[in-house]
Amino acid sequence: MSSKVVTSIKDKCTETKIKECEKIKKLCNPNSKSNDPKYYCFNDTEKNRDKIKEFKKEAEQVPQKEAEQVPQKEAEQVPQKEAEQVPQKEAEQNFIEKFLMEKAEIIKKEKDKTVTKPGSIKYLLFGSELSEQSLSIKMGKIGEEMVKKIIDNSKDFELLECGVQCIDIDNKKNKDIDLLWINHKLKIIYYREAKGNIELDSEKLPATIDKMKEIIKTHISPKYPSYTNDVGIFNWSIYNRKELKSGLSHIKKCEEKGIKIEHPEDLFKLLNFNWNEENYYKFFRKLGKYLRK
């Protein structure tokens, strides 16, 4: 299996790497597996500094947690066969479900919740309750976070800088890149825009396609000229296309423009991650009920 559950965290920034990044006024990414400063150095921004702090904090906590979880005497008593009883696929599924539930808890605890207000039919029928539209918007980023976490725990791929960044220095143009990762061995750059709803309206669809082509042309291809680009839209609200009735025309338009549409089944295969259709839907329905409480 290529994906793995991380039980220890190691800072990959050596003194040499840090100095190389300082020379070009950048920061060293402690999570980068590359030995090329082109990849392990990232921009000196407040967001990246926070990422480094969070990484170091997590690295400090992991050994302590592991020591508390398994006392030495107990560890010696656990038979090897018992340790092997939990399949790798269950371990992968458990760790991502725990991660997503933690993200959902943060959303649920937010104080600025949008609720239905007097003056609407929904309020008349059901009273004040959490706005499902507001909840869907907040949950929109969960699909991105899910894939980032899976990539971070894979030995075959490296997560590159995502989020808002400058894609055109000459024109000082910033764009929000949802998902960007790399396979150094195969020399492939993977770029995905995450969409919870594939039924993009007629205005948003061309804009999304234009945005992706611009990012490839001005940012990805110049930065990684010897790498192959693998580009697509990740629609994560449906596990695969089997039961999809609407949105097919939008998919066809994207694919005609050379941008494929992927769903969790496709992306999980690419990332060698085990999470089947039944358990995927089962988890998100459980998460939905939790958020509605």
Image (tube, rainbow, N blue to C red):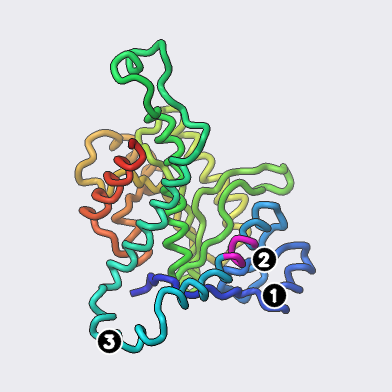
The amino acid sitting under disc 1 is: Lys
In this view, the residue in front, 273 or 283, is 283
Earlier in the chain: of badge 1 and badge 3, it is 1
As displayed, is residue 43 above or below residue 171? below
Q: Circles 2 and 1: CB distance less than 8 Å?
A: yes
Q: CA distance from mark 2 to mark 3?
A: 41 Å
Where on the picture, by quarter, is residue 173? top right
- Relative image position of residue 112 (x, y in whole percent): 52, 32
Rounded to the nearest whole Å, what is the CA distance between mark 1 and mark 3?
39 Å
Q: Which residues are magenta?
A: 53-57
Which mark is nearer the camera, 2 or 3? 3
Tell me which amino acid carries mark 3.
Gln
Q: How many marks?
A: 3
Q: Judge by depth and name the residue closer to the eye, 78 or 199.
A: 78
Q: Residue at x 27, y 49 (%)?
A: 239
Residue, disc 3: 80
Secondary element under disc 3, as helix, strand or loop, is helix
| Camera-side residue of 157 and 206 | 157
Q: Could you give the CA–CA distance between mark 2 and mark 1, rounded to whole angstroms?
A: 8 Å
Disc 2 marks which residue? 41
Contact, mark 2 vs mark 3 (Cβ under 8 Å): no
Residue at the spot of label 1: 17
